[in-house]
Image (cartoon, coloured by chain):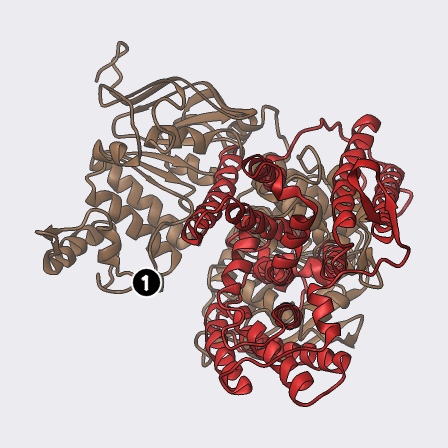
Amino acid sequence: MTSVDGRDDILLMSGITKSFPGVTALRDVTFSVRRGEIHAICGENGAGKSTLMKVLSGVHPHGSYSGEVVFDGEVCGFAGIRDSEALGIVIIHQELALVPQLSIAENLFLGNEIANRGMIDWNRTNHEATKHMRRVGLDENPTAAAGELGVGKQQLVEIAKALSKEVKLLILDEPTAALNDDDSAHLLDLLRGLRDEGITCVVISHKLGEVTAIADTITILRDGETIETLDAADVSEDRIIAGMVGRDLEHRFPPREPAIGEEVLRIEDWTVHSVTNPGRVVVDHATLSLRRGEIVGLAGLMGAGRTELAMSVFGRSYGTDISGRVLKDGREIDVRTVRSAIRNGIAYVSEDRKRYGLNMVTDVKRNVSAAGLGLLAKRNWVNEYEEFRVAERYRTALRIKTPDVTAGAQTLSGGNQQKVVLAKWMFTDPDVLILDEPTRGVDVGAKYEIYTIVHQLAEQGKAVLVISSELPELLGLCDRIYTLSAGRITGEVPRADATQEQLMEYMTREVRR
Amino acid sequence: MSLDVRSPAAESVAAPPRRFRLNLRQSGIYVAFALIVVLFTALTDGALLQPGNISNIVVQNSYVLILAIGMMLVIISGHIDLSVGSVVAVTGGICAVLTVQMGLPWWLAVLATLAAGVLIGAAQGYWVAYFGIPAFIVTLGGMLVFRALTLTVLGNQGIGPFPDEIRTLANGFTGGYLGNVGLGPLGGADIVSLLVGVLVVVGFAMSQLRTRRARQGYDQTVDPMPLFIGKIVFAAVVVLFFVVQLARFRNLPWVLVLLAVLVLGYSLMASRSVFGRHIYAVGGNLQAATLSGVRVKQVTFWVFVNMGLLSALAGVVFAGRLNQAGPTAGNSFELDAIAAAFIGGAAVQGGVGKVVGAITGGLIMGVINNGMSLIGAPSERVMLVKGLVLLAAVAYDVWTKRRAGAVR
C-alpha cells in the first residue's frame, strides 16, 4: 500500500481504543509502520505498549476494541492469534514460550508440524529446522532439548520459529531484557539482517541505548496515547525519555552526598560450586567488603556468578560445597539458613520478583509483612491492624501506586511490585541490602524513585550491594564497583575512576584456572 | 518522602476512601449456600429446616466437615491428601480395638487414637516435606497402606459396640441441665441451648465491635454504622433461628459444639497466627516464602501432621456414630473433603482459601444430599448433582479470576 505522502506502510493502526473494566488502556492510538523498517515502541510500564501489540496480534480479538487495523493494504479483524500469524504477523513475548523438554526442531514447528497424513516427518522437520537455525546463526543440533540452551539461544529459536512461519512483521517484546551484552549485540545484528531481507520489525524496549542504535523510527506511548513518532536518526536517549515521562528528566539519577562509615560486612574467600554440576566452581575465592552508608556495585556478564554469589551468601539459597567466611562488624556470622541471614541483618531482593519475591495470590500488605512477620507478632499471633498500618506507611513512603494495601499484588505494575518487595525487606530493618537487578522491567519514572530509595537507605547507614547488567546504572548509583568474571573478583573501582570501557575490560578479563 | 517509617512518629496515613462493594469472588460461596438452602426449603415444603432435620444435617456431615478443615489447610499449602478416608478407617479401628477389645477407658483410647493420627500424619508429612515426594503420590500410597492396615487391625470384620461416651460425642446431645422453657406456638425448648445461642450472638457482636474500634484506632476504614448493625442483626437472626430449632428438637449435638470450637480455633490460627500465615505463604509462592525466611519444610510437615490429627478425630466420630469400626469405613471421604475445600473457595494452585469456606462447601454438599433424599431423589442423581456443583464452583472461581486478571 502506498499512502498519499508516498510512504509504503505495511501496517496502519488508527483510532485504536481499548478499555478494560475501570481502565482505558489505549485511547485513540495511531500507529503506522513502514515496510522494511525497524520501528521501536517506547513507553513506561502501563503506557499501553503490550496492549497495542495484543490488539495487533489478535490476542484481544476484533470487536473487543474500537478502531481500525490495516495490514498490507487490507482491513483486518483478527479473531485470534492464528489469524494474524496466517498473514505473517508474529509476536515474540518477553517470557519465552518454548517447551523446555521438546527439541529445538519440535519447538520450531510446534502447532505447525511437518507431517504426512498425521504422522510427523522427522527428517524433513530436522532438515527445515537446521535451515531456519542457520538463518539466525544458531549452531546447535536441532534435536537438542530447548531447555538446555541459554536464554540468548532460546531467543534465537523463537526468531527462527517466526521465520519458519514466513513472517512479514516481527514483533519483539523486550527481546534483550534477559540477555547479556554479547547476546544482545548478536540479536541486534540479526534484526538488522532481517530488515535487509525485507522483514519489518517492531521492537518494544526499555533499553534506550539499543533503541537509538537499531531503530529507524520511534513511536512513544504514554498513558495509553500516542505522544509522538520520531525519526531515530537524530534522536538522543534523553529526548526519548522526555517524551516517555512527559517531563524533562535532566538527571536520570538523583543527587547524593555519600557519608560512608565503618566496614559492616565482609565476605572472605567465598567459594561456591554449581548445583547442577558440582564439579564446577561458580564463585571462586571472592572477597568483598561493604561499609555503612555505602552503595557498592557488582558488575559482571551473565554467567559470571553475580546472583550465585548473592544467593549463596543469603542463607545458602544457591550452590553446594560452599566455603569461606562472612563477617559482620568484624565478627563471623552464621548465614547457613535464610533465617539466620535475616537475623544477622542481611536482605536479598531477587532479580526475578515474580518467582522469588512476591506471593501473587495475596495482597500487598501480606507481601510487605512476609519476611518480618515476627516483628508484628506477639507470642505467634499477628497483629493485623499493625500490619495494615505498616503496609500503609510503606505505601505512602515508597509511593506504591495502589488504591489500598488490600489490593492483590498481581494488580500492580512492575515498578510498584518492585517497591513492594523493597518494602518487605526494609521492614526487616537490615544493615545490608543486596539488590539484584533492582530496576529490571521497571519504567524510567519508577527507576528514579527506586534510586531515591536506595540513596535514602544508604543515608540511614545501611550498606547496599547493587547487582546490575546496566553499567550506566552502576556508574550513576554506586560509590564503588566490583567486577566479577567467571566467578572471580577481577576489579574494584571507585566511582570517580570508573568508566564503562574499563569495567567492561575487567568483566571480560580472562581468569587463569 | 520520608523513609523513616518504622518510628511511631511517622505521620499517620489518610484513610483511603472505600465504597461498599460486594466482593462476589469471596462472598459468592455464601450467597450460593443461601440460595441452595432456600431452593431445597421450597422443594421440601420446609422439611429441610425442621428442627430434627437441621440436627441431622450437622450430625451426618460432621466427620466430613472435620476433614474439610484439615484438607483446606493442606490445599492452601499447595498439596493434597488422598489418604484421609483410609486414615479415618484405621483410626476408627484402632479406637475400637483399644476400647472394645482391650477395655481401655474411653478418654485414654481417644487420646491414643489421636496420637496414632498424629504419627500417621508425621509419616506422610516426612515424605512430602523432607524427602520431596509429591503429596499426591505419598497419600495415594497412604490410601492403600492404611486401608490394608485397617483390614489387619480389624481382622476383616466390624468391631463394636463403643462405650457410651464415644457414642455420645458422635451422636448425642447436650443434657437439658436447666429444663425447658415454653416458646408459645413453637412449643418447649431447651434453656441451655438457647443460652448458648444468645451467648454466641453477644460474643459475635462484641468481637465485631472490638474489631471495629481497633480498626478505627489504627486509622482504617470501617463499614458505616447502619451497615455494621445490619450485618450483626442478620447474623444474629440466622444463628438464633438455627439454635431455636435445635433447642426445640433435642438440644445441641455434642459434635456441633466440637465443630464450633474447631472452626473458631482453626480460623484464628489460619488468619492470625504466624504458622497460619506461613501456610498461605508456602502455597502462594514456595520460593518467595523460602527466601523470606519461612521454614517451608517444617510448615508442610506440620500441615500433614494436623491433617492426620483431624482424620483421627473424624475416625473416632464416625466409628462412634455407627457404633462400630468397619473395614469399609471412610470410603471416598477424601473426595468429599477435597470437594468441600474446592467448593469452599480453595484455589487449585494453593495459597488461597478459608476454613469457613471449607465448612460452607461441606454444608452445601450436605444440604444437597439431605434435601435430595428428602424429595426422594435416587442416589445416582445426588452424585450427579454434587459432581456438577463442584465443577460449577471451580469454574466460577476460574472465571472471576480471569475477569480480574483481564484488567491488566
Q: What chain letter is assigned to the residue under label 1?
A: A
User: Horizontal placement of A452 versus A86: left or right?
Assistant: right
Residue A403 in view in this figure: yes
Disc 1 residue type (three-letter)? Gln
The secondary element bearing badge 1 is classed as loop
Q: Where residue A51 appears, x then y in whole percent?
A: 44, 31
**Chain A is shown in which shade?**
brown
Q: Nearer the viewer, residue A422 or B341?
A: B341
Q: Residue pushed farthest bottom?
A: B102
User: Horizontal placement of A301 versus A184: left or right?
Assistant: right
Q: Residue at x 65, y 62 (%)?
A: B66
User: Horizontal placement of A101 versus A413: left or right?
Assistant: left
- Taking B177 as reference, is B149 above or below it? below
Q: Residue at x 34, y 24 (%)?
A: A62
Q: Nearer the viewer, residue A411 or B327?
A: B327
Tell me the residue that label 1 is attached to. Answer: A101
Q: Nearer the viewer, residue A89 or A174?
A: A89
Quadrant in the picture for residue A216: top left
Q: Where residue A70 appears, x then y in whole percent?
A: 28, 20
Q: Where residue A391 appears, x then y in whole percent?
A: 75, 44
Quadrant in the picture for residue A266: bottom right
Q: Which quadrant is the N terminus of chain A positioned in?
A: top left
